[in-house]
Amino acid sequence: MPIRSLHIDCDDDACRRRFLAAFQEAGIHPESSHGSEVPPGTRLLIVCGADAAALAEAVRRRRASLPAGETAILATMRAPSYGDIPRVLDAGADDCLQAPFANSLLVARARSLLRRMTPQPDAPSA
């Protein structure tokens, strides 16, 4: 499944490069951007953070500014404590990964989110 538009909201340049490399290793060469502005038409937004409260707030702001149902948000965080992942999911993330994680897991979760957003053809009538 191609990922046409990917935006990475991450202050850590090495982390952003790692994520892009993970998709490229999987044979996916997304149109990508990064920074504070999410371009129109973005299908997948990856938001990174170390602090759960700041990550939850970033996800909440992003979710509020995006058109409903058009963009999946995948949050990643280092060393969350009990309750941090539910907090980020409740803030509007569609999924949350705890670092460290394998690149293959990042790519698989991204594909899963995009499959859920893609309209499925109607089942044939019996």
Image (cartoon, rainbow, N blue to C red):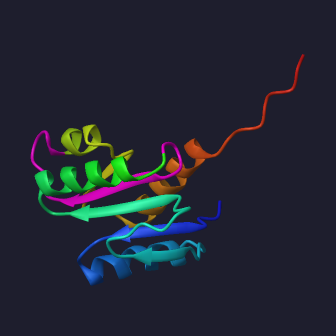
Residue at the top extreme, as displayed: 126
The foreground one among 72 and 125 is 72
Percent from the top left, x then y, of residue 34? 38, 76
Number of marks: 0
Residue 22 appears in the picture as rendered: yes
Q: Quadrant of the C terminus?
A: top right
Please indicate whether residue 59 sits to the left or right of residue 110 in the image: left
The magenta stretch spans which residues? 68-84
Task: Name which residue lies at 22% across and 38% down.
Answer: 86
Left or right position of 108 against 8? right
Is residue 101 visible to the viewer in this orientation of the structure? no
In the rendered image, the residue lying farthest to the right is 126
| Residue lying at 19% horizontally and 41% vertically, measured from the top left | 87
Which quadrant is home to the N terminus?
bottom right
Magenta-span inclusion, residue 82: yes
Q: Which residue: 26% across, 37% down?
A: 90
> Does the magenta run of residues contain 52?
no
Question: In the rendered image, which quarter is residue 77 located in?
Answer: bottom left
Comparing 97 with 67, the one in front is 67
**Quadrant of residue 54 in the image?**
bottom left
Q: Is residue 70 above or below residue 35?
A: above
Name the residue rendered at 42%, 58% in the picture: 105
Residue 98 vertical placement versus 6 (above, below): above
Spot occupied by residue 27 in the image (x, y as percentages of width and height):
60, 74
Quadrant of the rendered structure where residue 11 is?
bottom left
Q: Residue 100 or 17: which is nearer the viewer?
A: 17
Relative image position of residue 31 (x, y in whole percent): 56, 75
